[in-house]
Image: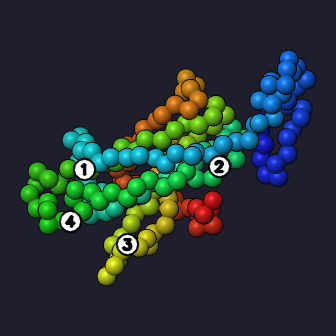
Amino acid sequence: YHVSIPNVINSLNLGYDFSNQFDFDIKINAIDQPPLIAPTFYLDTDPDFPQNNMWGKIFEFKYRYVYDTNEKSAFSPSSIITTAYNYAPGQNTDGNNFHKDNRAIISYNWGQEHVKEVEICARIIQQSEGEGFSTDIGWFVAETLERARTQSAYSSGTYNFYNDKPYKLIPPSETAK
């Protein structure tokens, strides 16, 4: 009983067993809700990961749902932008600090029970000459996470992001959703 563009209700999926008006309202109010809460993240050190691909970069994250109908939701609001401890390479000339903050631990919400996957998306923010920041690369899918059968609706999840592989860019027309 999902409502999707063009906002049509498949009445066959609603069934005919309505014990009261409340039950009917619950089934009609079936619009798929996109993520409404921005992901949060913090930088952390993984001593077992030998590289630091976060070095000198600033990241921003957001996520979206993939429903059991394979429809993708709009994106969540974007996370805050955090400068890594090691953003200024001059701060980390000593070998002990090179592996500091080599991953971001991202927290997100799983949404409704018919969300089958969550796409964690990221972009690298680059400091431009002069004022402010600019983004040159665009948003990319960092990971697509499958929902476990035991994962309850609206529960929280976490993902460890290392920036350690090639990523697929998301077309700009899609990231504006």
Which label is found at residue 133? 3
Q: Nearer the viewer, mark 4 or mark 3?
A: 3
Judge whether residue 56 can be spotted in this image: yes
Question: Do residues under tags 4 and 3 come within 8 Å of each other at their CB atoms?
Answer: no
Q: Is residue 152 left or right of residue 135?
A: right
Tell which tag, 3 or 1, sits nearer the viewer.
3
Residue 139: x %, y % from top left? 50, 62
* Residue beneath disc 2: 73
Image position of 58 with respect to 77: above or below: below
How far is the residue under mark 2 from the one under mark 4? Answer: 36 Å
- The span from disc 4 to disc 3 (Cα, nearest Å) is 15 Å
Q: Which residue type does callout 4 highlight? A: Ala
Q: Position of residue 138 (x, y in %)?
A: 49, 67
The residue beneath circle 4 is 88
Q: Which residue is mark 1?
A: 101
Q: Nearer the viewer, residue 114 or 80?
A: 80
Disc 3 marks a residue whose amino acid type is Phe
Name the N-terminal-most of marks 3 and 2.
2
Q: Quadrant of the C terminus?
A: bottom right
